[in-house]
């Protein structure tokens, strides 16, 4: 009788072991996934007064994830105010009541969302896109040229 109970207990242990083995999670299969390429690209252009525009563009795969535009004077100092870039006659350069750096920030976000090639400008370099011209009234050609240089496109003359 003890042999039958021992044999039954052994059978239960073996069954429990088999059931436990099948309940394990299968190993994750990573063969179907691939890393999205992240890139950081840089471009440069010049303003008429000798100032430099630097553009840094970050991409995740095919999409732009960040666009940063910065200005540097002839001596290598960062430009943070419009009169540093254009001199005291800055009122002729911007016709809307929006701070210069806010306009640049808006342009960066617009490029990120719509792409640099979607922006059209007039003969003065000011945006003609309806959803852009109310927020940016600067000559954006040097900025667009720097961004295009960063992403590898040739700037239109």
Image (cartoon, rainbow, N blue to C red):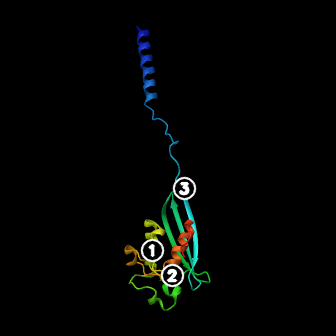
Q: Which residue is mark 1?
A: 120
**Can you give x and y, in whole percent of width and height, for residue 71 in the image?**
54, 78
**Which image quarter: residue 41?**
bottom right
Image mark for residue 80: 2
User: Residue 81 versus residue 22: which sits nearer the camera?
Assistant: 81
Q: Mark 3 or mark 1: name the one nearer the start of the chain.
A: 3
Of labels 3 and 2, the one closer to you: 3
Image quarter where the C terminus lies is bottom right
- At a point 43% along the width and 21% down the height, the residue shown is 15
Q: Is residue 8 above or below residue 136?
A: above
State the SS at label 1: loop
- CA gap, disc 3 to disc 2? 32 Å
Position of residue 26 measured from the top left corner of the image (x, y, whole percent): 47, 35
Residue displayed at 43% across by 17% down: 11
Viewer-nearest of discs 1 and 2? 1
Q: Quadrant of the N terminus?
A: top left
Q: Is residue 27 above or below residue 142?
A: above
Q: Secondary structure at mark 3?
A: loop
Left/right of residue 60 with respect to residue 75 in the rendered view: left
Sequence-earlier tag: 1 or 2? 2
Badge 3 density bin: few <14, some 14–19, many ≥20, Cα 10 Å: few
In contact (CB < 8 Å): disc 3 and disc 1 = no
Q: Are marks 1 and 2 in contact (CB under 8 Å)?
A: no
| Other-residue count near label 2 (Cα within 10 Å), few / some / many at <14 / 14–19 / ≥20 | few
Q: Secondary structure at mark 2?
A: loop
Measured Cα–Cα span from mark 1 to mark 2: 25 Å
Marks 3/1: CA distance?
29 Å
Question: Any mark on residue 37, and which?
Answer: 3
Give coordinates of residue 91: x percent, y percent.
Answer: 44, 89
């Amino acid at each position: 009788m003890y042999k039958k109970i021992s044999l039954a207990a052994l059978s239960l242990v073996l069954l429990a072991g088999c059931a436990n083995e099948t309940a394990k999670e299968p190993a994750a299969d990573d063969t179907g996934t691939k890393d999205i390429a992240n890139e950081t690209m840089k471009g440069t252009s010049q303003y008429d007064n000798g100032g430099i525009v630097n553009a840094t563009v970050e991409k995740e795969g095919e999409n732009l994830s960040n666009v940063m535009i910065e200005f540097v004077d002839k001596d290598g100092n960062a430009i943070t105010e419009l009169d540093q870039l254009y001199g005291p006659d800055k009122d002729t350069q911007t016709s809307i009541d929006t701070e210069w750096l806010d306009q640049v920030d808006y342009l960066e976000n617009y490029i990120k969302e719509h792409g640099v090639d979607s922006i059209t400008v007039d003969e003065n370099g000011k945006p003609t896109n309806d959803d852009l011209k109310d927020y940016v009234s600067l000559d954006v050609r040097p900025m667009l040229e720097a961004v295009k240089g960063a992403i590898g496109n040739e700037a239109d003359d």
